[in-house]
Image (tube, rainbow, N blue to C red):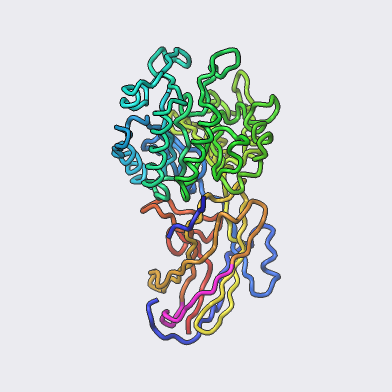
Amino acid sequence: MVHSPMKRPARLAIVAVLAAVVAAALPATGSTAATQPGWRPLAAAEAPDANPLKGFIPYAGAYTTFPHSMEWFYLPLNAVMTGPHRFDWRPLEEQLNTIAARGHQAAFRFYLDYPSKPSGIPQFLLDQGLMTRPYDDFGNNGQSVSPDYDDPNLVAALDRFIAALGRRYDGDPRVGFVQLGLLGFWGEWHTWPYNGDGTENWFASPAQQLRMLNAYDAAFDETRLMVRYPGADNRAHDLGYHDDSFAYSTLPGPGWHFMDLMRQAGTTDKWKSNTVAGELRPELQGCLFNTPMDCAGDGDKDFAAGVAQTHATWLLNHYAFSPGYTGAAYGNALAAAKSLGYELQVTAVRSEARHRGLDLAVRIRNDGVAPFAYDWPVQVAAVGGDGRIARVWTTSWRLTGVMPGVPAELTAALSTEDLRKGDYTLVLRAANPLRHGMPLRFANAGQDTTVSGWLTLGRTRIS
């Protein structure tokens, strides 16, 4: 898949001169910009409590109990696939629109079989004779059923659904991440304990799994995809992973934990190009951040080590939103949420005047554990003395390439020939393509000081 960026008048001016870049009082930690000609440091600040496409997220709903930028939901396939070639997208549209209205992006998964919920199998497939298996595990008590995932009619239907989903929603700014789903209990790509280990194997054949991987990879070029388990069959596909037992079976050891599978598949570096996320194990959500941590039973219970090894960007943790944390647990949970994903800071700025233009450079670093997921348009703007933006330049800078621990230097040639002479303040942002979406904020003291949602770089005089 190719992740493409989401998205002068004519007035003669004379020479553009950057008089000075106004730096805040303290240089960024570790910066040598102050000793290098032309570079001016920008002061660091604490990262915001919430930033787009990272952190803890709830099941879809209006919550003010914990900072967040995304919401999660499941949908049964039969909610939208009403016939072999018929789709009613209204249930998905309603979810996406409601979430977007709160300024959030969505992550979601479709399922056929969700224990304890009514079956998600489209009726036309049952009418065509699709074989299903009842079960009582996971509190299901026969409510849902497990289908024959290799049934030819089901295989063909899933091919058509995935293709249609990609045609309609690939690159949709309301969508942050799509998990492949569809196969297995909860769409989680397993049917344990019916996995052939002393029992009948109900799961899809390797051939059907590969067919699904190929179908999703072909259908989506922009929107980030995730599959549950790392494996040799998906190593070359342009998709990430979701660890749905985070901090329980994450760290390596027994051979089947998430990081065991990452190492066996040779995908431990895949976080550099594809997002890793998941769900904090439900029984750990209410106890893991207590002081002292008082979770009973099995499990890794080492959140920090899990983040460090997986490079996770976001986790479903509904407990943070309802009933919510209090006291020290809230502070610990907030720090844990902020430790996920990226943390971007501009450490220094440099400019050089040229005829009818300005050469601008910024030094940027990522103090998080993962890169930003998308190449949102990185823009520079000139703000006039009236506080209004007089000109916006869209650069070719790509935030996905700013890796943790590897500072980057980004340069751009900006034309100023259409600006009136006078004093301007330069500001910077990565533009969220979601209308009224949460701005990406840098860990800088100058964030939001000139224009909300923009980082102040400094002053320039066009003369």
Residue placed at 41% from the left, 27% from the top?
Answer: 112
User: Can residue 193 be seen from the camera position used here?
Assistant: yes
Q: Quadrant of residue 134?
A: top left
Tell me residue 389's x, y (percent): 40, 69
In this rendering, is residue 363 above or below 158? below
x, y percent for residue 188: 50, 28
Q: Quadrant of residue 321?
A: top left
Q: Is residue 300 magenta?
A: no
Q: Residue 422 in magenta?
A: yes
Numbered-mark total:
0
| x then y, percent, for residue 11 | 39, 83
Check the image and report above or below for 263 versus 351: above
Please give the name of the residue rendered at 50% of the width and 65% of the height, measured from the top-left corner. Answer: 456
The residues colored magenta run 411-423
Report the residue at 46% width, 32% height from top: 181
Q: Residue furthest front?
A: 152
Q: Position of residue 420 (x, y in %)?
A: 41, 81
Residue 270, compared with residue 199, is above or below; it is below
Q: Is residue 185 left or right of residue 274?
A: left
Closer to the camera, 326 or 308?
Answer: 308
Whether residue 338 appears in this view of the structure is: no
Q: Which residue is depicted at the point 46% across and 38% down?
A: 66
Task: Determine which quarter of the picture holds residue 256.
Answer: top right
Residue 306 or 213: which is nearer the viewer? 213
Left or right, residue 86 beside residue 213: left
